[in-house]
Amino acid sequence: MALFLAIALQRRRRVILAASLVAALAIVALSAGRPLGETLAGRLYIWKVSAPHVFDRPLVGFGPGAFEPMYVRWETQAWKAGTVRKSERRFADVQDHAHNDYLELATDAGLPAALALGAIVVSLLAFARRHAHGTVALASACGVTAISAAALVDFPLHRPAELFVFWVLAAIVFVDAPAAAASE
């Protein structure tokens, strides 16, 4: 989010990035959750088990909601094949989501669907960078950036409230950006 804002505003770029980095480090340091390293190791394990199967059915995926039932099979295959380390045994468990919306979409609906979602996000942010000059449009684009970034390590686009906020913020960028540019 801060990176998008720094790129969009171009001025005060270093100040925005430095303040954002300090804030992010403080949030991670003060977080009451699991240690960040352990969380990332768990995510990497899930991705290592599931990502190769995107290519089993690259065009159409395994079907909506297929990740959870397929993951059990994939994990069993990975353990039998020896593609995971014994030290990763602590992460072995039933998973209802990939903790990466783009990967889960690729397994459920195929690579074209995941690429289409990525293209929507990238084109929206490119549009916002070029046309969003008002505070509302920039703030909305930052929100889209935050949700899109969170989707790399979580599944906000699978939760109705966050998905709704994502699309509302996207709409605000398109509605407010031209209006803000015209009033300048």
Image: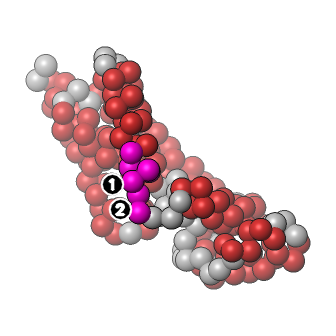
Q: Quadrant of residue 142?
A: top left
Magenta span of residues: 26-32
Instruction: Residue at 34% x, 32% y: name it.
Output: 19
Q: How many marks?
A: 2
Q: Quadrant of residue 47?
A: bottom right
From the viewer's perspective, tell me whether residue 121 is left or right of residue 108: left
Is residue 29 rendered magenta in the image? yes
In this rendering, the answer to whether 22 lies above or below 172 is above
- The x and y percentages for residue 176 are 19, 37
From the image, give the main secondary structure of the stretch colored magenta: helix
- The x and y percentages for residue 111 are 63, 56
Q: Is residue 60 visible?
A: no
Q: Which residue is mark 1?
A: 166
Label 1: element kind: helix
Instruction: Residue at 65% x, 60% y: name it.
Output: 41
Instruction: Residue at 39% x, 29% y: name it.
Output: 17
Q: Nearer the viewer, residue 147 or 90?
A: 90
Q: Residue furthest left?
A: 183
Question: The N terminus appears in which quarter of the rendering?
Answer: top left
Q: Nearer the viewer, residue 91 or 167?
A: 91
User: Which mark, residue 163?
Assistant: 2
Between marks 2 and 1, how big is the CA–CA gap? 5 Å
